Image (tube, helix red, strand yellow):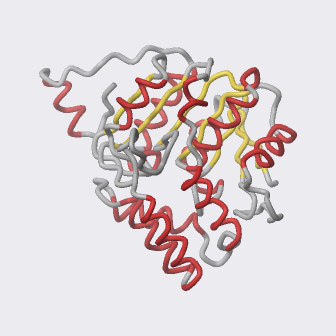
């Protein structure tokens, strides 16, 4: 598994989402590297990581990550990377100092007691379409991630650049990643997490309804949640500055006060896309 290590300071592991690779963190990583030692992981079959059968089965993957990453670190996961980060934290609680979940949820698929998620049929359709036209399916997923964002065109362009169509993820890795998204339910695991948790979500995310944050608080009462105004499924791209501030404030134990939207400053912050908490 390829892991790019850059920066200086406390260790921070960063896991990308489905169909992407660690290059998606490029701008955010440049900003964070002055204060943190970043471990930018390419999941199996993505980016510069090779593919082996069963490499994305959760138990195999978590143990592989444990063998290659620092004994203790902060962890940050986006989308599928967030799901994997919850699993790692549950398996190795002593190794995760703090956990940040960006546009991630403990359960991506709707269930009777979990309506704040996507219909499993949508993921099934992606799986079927991958077999017919992988490039077109990945491009459609890029659009879905950026849809609704105030900066959707720029987000699509940036995600497309980092997807590296010339060197796409392995087809087996994409199917295995979708299988994880469809079948994995980490709600019980999130409930038992002992370290501080931060969840960051865009209020225009088309994959994860913003109501999920309230559901998550019922599962894990100590979780800190924030909603970024005008952001879609890739808030670290569309609202890069605010997302970086959010991450650093949480990791450095700096308090974030609730914005008063009745004040003039609050109104101006809302217009500029500042998150609420």
Tell me: 242 left or right of 72.
Answer: left
Q: Quadrant of the N terminus?
A: bottom right
Q: Position of residue 228 (x, y in %)?
A: 34, 38
Give me the residue at 57% from left, 42% from top: 82
Give me the residue at 12% from left, 22% from top: 262
Residue 198's place in the image compared with 231, above or below, is above
Tell me: 256 left or right of 179.
Answer: left
Quarter location, residue 273: top left
Q: Position of residue 32 (x, y in %)?
A: 60, 36
Give me the residue at 52% from left, 39% from top: 106
User: Depth check: 198 or 3 in front?
Assistant: 198
Q: Position of residue 141 (x, y in %)?
A: 46, 67
Residue 153's place in the image compared with 81, above or below, is below
Residue 53's place in the image compared with 118, above or below, is below
Give me the residue at 82% from left, 37% from top: 66
Quarter location, residue 173: bottom right
User: Depth check: 240 or 121 in front?
Assistant: 121
Q: Position of residue 61 (x, y in %)?
A: 77, 48
């Amino acid at each position: 598994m390829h892991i790019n290590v850059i920066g200086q300071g406390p260790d921070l592991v960063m896991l990308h989402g489905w169909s992407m690779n660690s290059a998606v963190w490029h701008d955010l990583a440049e900003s964070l590297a002055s204060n943190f030692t970043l471990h930018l992981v390419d999941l199996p079959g993505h980016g510069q990581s090779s593919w082996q059968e069963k490499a994305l089965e959760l138990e195999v993957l978590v143990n592989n990550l444990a063998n290659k990453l620092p004994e203790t670190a902060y962890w940050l996961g986006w989308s599928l990377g967030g799901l994997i980060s919850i699993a790692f934290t549950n398996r190795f609680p002593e190794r995760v100092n703090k956990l940040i979940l960006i546009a991630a949820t403990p359960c991506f698929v709707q269930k009777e007691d979990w309506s704040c998620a996507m219909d499993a049929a949508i993921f099934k359709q992606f799986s079927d379409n991958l077999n017919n036209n992988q490039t077109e399916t990945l491009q459609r997923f890029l659009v879905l991630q950026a849809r609704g964002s105030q900066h959707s065109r720029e987000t699509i362009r940036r995600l497309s650049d980092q997807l590296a169509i010339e060197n796409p993820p392995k087809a087996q890795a994409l199917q295995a990643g979708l299988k994880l998204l469809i079948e994995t339910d980490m709600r019980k695991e999130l409930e038992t997490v002992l370290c501080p948790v931060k969840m960051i979500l865009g209020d225009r995310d088309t994959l994860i309804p913003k109501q999920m944050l309230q559901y998550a608080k019922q599962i894990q009462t100590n979780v800190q949640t924030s909603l970024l105004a005008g952001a879609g499924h890739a808030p670290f791209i569309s609202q890069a500055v605010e997302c970086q501030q959010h991450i650093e404030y949480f990791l450095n134990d700096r308090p974030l006060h609730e914005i008063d939207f009745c004040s003039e400053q609050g109104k101006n912050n809302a217009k500029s896309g500042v998150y609420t908490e």
